[in-house]
Image (spheres, rainbow, N blue to C red):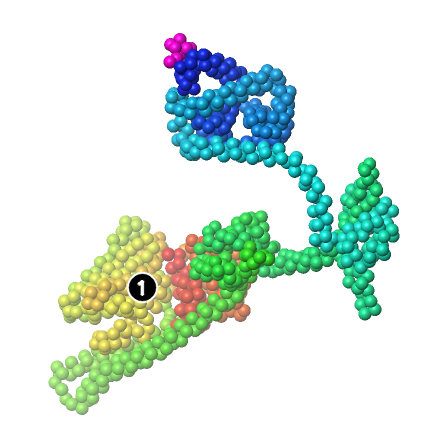
Amino acid sequence: MISRQKSLEIESELGFIPAFLIAASDTPLVLENLWQQMQICYVNNPLPVLFKEKLFAYLSRYCSVAYCIICHSCEARSLGMQSKAILELLETPTPTAKNIEEELNAVPSLSEEIWLEADWEGEKAIFSCAIFMFLHPNIVGGGAIAATVGSQLKRMLGSENYNNLMAFLGYIKTCHLWVEAHPQLAYQLDKPAYDRIGMLFVEEPRLADFFRNYSDRVREESYSREEQLLAEFTQNLQALEELQQKNQALETLIEARSMATISLDNNGNVKAWSQAAERMFGWSPQEVLDRPLAIVPENQQQEFWTMFATTLQGGIVASADLTSIPNKNTQSEVSPSPDTYEIRLWTAPVHDSEGNICGIMALIADITDHKQSEERLRLLESVVVNANDAILITEAEPINYPGPRILYVNEAFSRMTGYSAEEVLGKSPRLLQGPKTDRAKLDKLRTALERWEPVEVDLMNYRKNGTQFWVELSITPVANEKGWYTHWISIQREIDERKWTEEEYQRLLADEQAARRAAEEASRAKDEFLAIVSHELRSPLSSILGWSRLLSTRNFDEGITVRALEIIERNARVQAQRLDDLADISRTIRGTLRLNVNQVNLISVVEAALKIVAEQASYKAIALDVVFPQIEEQKYTEARAQFNSQSSSPPLWVLGDAVRLQQIVWNLIDNAIKFTPSGGRVEVRLEQSDHHATLRVSDTGIGINPEMLPSIFERFRQADSSMTKLQGKLGLGLAIVRNLVELHGGTVGVESPGENQGATFTVQMPLLPLSVATNQWARGDENDTDTSFELETSAQLSPTACLLPNSYLDSLRVLVVDDEADVREFIRIALKQCGAIAVVASSAQEALQALTQDNFDVLVSDIGMPGENGYSLIRKLRAMEAKQNKNSQIQAIALTAYTRLEEQDRAIAAGFQIHLSKPVDPGILLTTIASFVCK
């Protein structure tokens, strides 16, 4: 038991009683000795405090009990050393005799006081030297080395610092012996260690594994040190034996490689001639001994003797690649040009016992095959470097993620992809892949690579700048002489043009097939339509002819006569309407349908159409609901007051043909009434938004089959031919509606939940600006026709010719493309008088150049131009916009003399917004452009 007095003394010094001292509590004398040594060599030792704890913790790796290493690791943490740094310290390899000299050279000679400072630059070297001296005296052969290290360390540190270091190392040895004699010692008895061990494990969990496997580490460290020092100890013993074996090994090597050796005296005469030299040159020793060496052609003699003099005078080894003279045994009349060798010649000095050069040893190797291989490699390298195809060489594995690393790329790869060699070396070829790279083809590649099979695929790759390109990819495995696959070689050929041609062919083929199907469908539809036309035209004629003959051959009373005349008149009107429909469709197909464009009050148009159908709705007891928009009347009131106008309620102005607009509205309402059973309901709703007027015609009638909705507006297409017959219609009304709406710059659509659930037709048209509409209405010019568009000549417009105000298209930039100068000039002047900025181009090439140099809002382009046509122009424009990631497209109008429906569909599919037929009506063209402004 430690006495009360000694306990107080230790606790006052340390703050606790270490388990290390508690183990000696039963032997007061031993306790006193241990305590005094601890005070002198450890506690009061002037060495840097953290240095002592780090050195104690590190050297405790060689103590078989974990008590010391844990306690001093915890103490180092309390002094500010991070847990990760403590683990790195404990795992640092032990210094060896080979690297200890470098550590010593790193220690500067400074005063004894300098080292007492923390983090001194030479502390690392002293740390390594101290470890070396602590460990090596215990191993056979290590004492002398440690003594040398100690003397050098003492000279640099000074006696005082050196003695303090040695005393500390001695104390550590004492501690290890004492602890190993008391293996029951545990760090839990030392309060500082117990308090800090948890912090170490939280900050660096790997320390827990280090301490847990402590015993195994101690055993491994001991074995490792003993093996290392024994290896160093026996190294010198082996040196002599190795030296004796070198000559024999060298001779064996020279013979095995068929290298000729020739000994020369200082005059260049042959003194020794090996068997390999005899085989190489064909001369026996008797033919060459004591004669000047002559194994190279005359034109290389000077180079050989220069080598000879360099070695003889300078005592250095010289070498050169030369051509040998022909082998004597291959010279004959049959073979006037005997074989020669490509040789590599070395000359080395031979010294006598006094160190003087007494001769020259020549070593000659046949490198003919090597030279030929080098030439083949140079040729292959030239082919690879200068190839137009991209060539990559990669490692063989891993096949799966992250993929084999790139080892080589040629210049063509950099040109093709934009990546330099430095940017891709060491990375996976997968960096060339992107979102549109075909996953199925990548799976095919992976399957072939896993089987070590060559593979070829066409693949979409990505350049460094993100652009896509197609390559024809060929990958082949490369094996070494043992048959093991070591590399992959990949050849990539860019095939963008070929792919574009293939895609264009497929597109043209698809277009041709679609056109054929469309033609067949159109032919079928026309046949069906002609049958309906024949029936529907003959039906009213039957009534007209029948009643006409009856009236001309018989006398009827007044009632029957009046009724007969009404029937004749009604059927004549039906006949006229059907003929008008056919005429409108014919004009639409030919592109000759013309509009008399004015500023039109859409409310008046709807009201006029309603008057026509009111009687029909009343006859079928159909409720006809009408809803007009709540227009901002205040603005119109102010304008009306300004012009002293007496006009009625505020109108809703659009640009259009009043007659055709009424035809649209009447057709939709008439359809709704005809297809709604008696007692049903039809609603006509007119709405206003910022830039558009929307007309909705809804009914509770027979509805439309959802399968027919996409084709309901097509020509020669009826939802039900029997229903058409039942209602007495040709089925052309909706086709006419669509064409008239589009000519006014609007859109039309239809919705229906299904059969017997009603339908809703919606027409949307661009409105005139409020200021323009209010101006005319306020003057009372609601039916003014002076603003009609009248073209006097193809290139001259009167100041009032444009129905739009001069500023309405102000600053709108329009690019006009046509190979006809008169057409370009006519459109340019028309646009200019309406306030637009028009730029003209005579070809697609000029247009593309203008598009790259300036921004435009609208493109008006002819289709049939020589060279590159309008379809090619619009495709390139849309491709440019997609590449530049533009949020909005240039609105495009196609002008063409081709009026077939297929040409219109083709223009829309190519990228145009609308198709107009030549000769183009200026009013329609400007109205269409104005609709783009509204949108």
Provide the residue span drawn in magenta: 1-9
Up-down relation of residue 217 to residue 456 (above or below): above
Q: Residue at x 62, y 58 (%)?
A: 384
Q: Residue at x 66, y 35 (%)?
A: 236
Up-down relation of residue 751 to residue 118 (above or below): below
Look at label 1 and name its amino acid: Val
**Where on the picture, by quarter, is residue 711?**
bottom left
In depth, the one of 254 and 640 nearer the eye is 254
Q: Residue at x 59, y 29 (%)?
A: 140
Is residue 731 within the magenta segment? no
Q: Residue at x 67, y 38 (%)?
A: 239
Q: Which residue is mark 1?
A: 748
What is the quadrant of the N terminus in the image?
top left
**Where on the picture, by quarter, is residue 185?**
top left
Left or right of residue 218: residue 763: left
Up-down relation of residue 96 to residue 599 (above or below): above
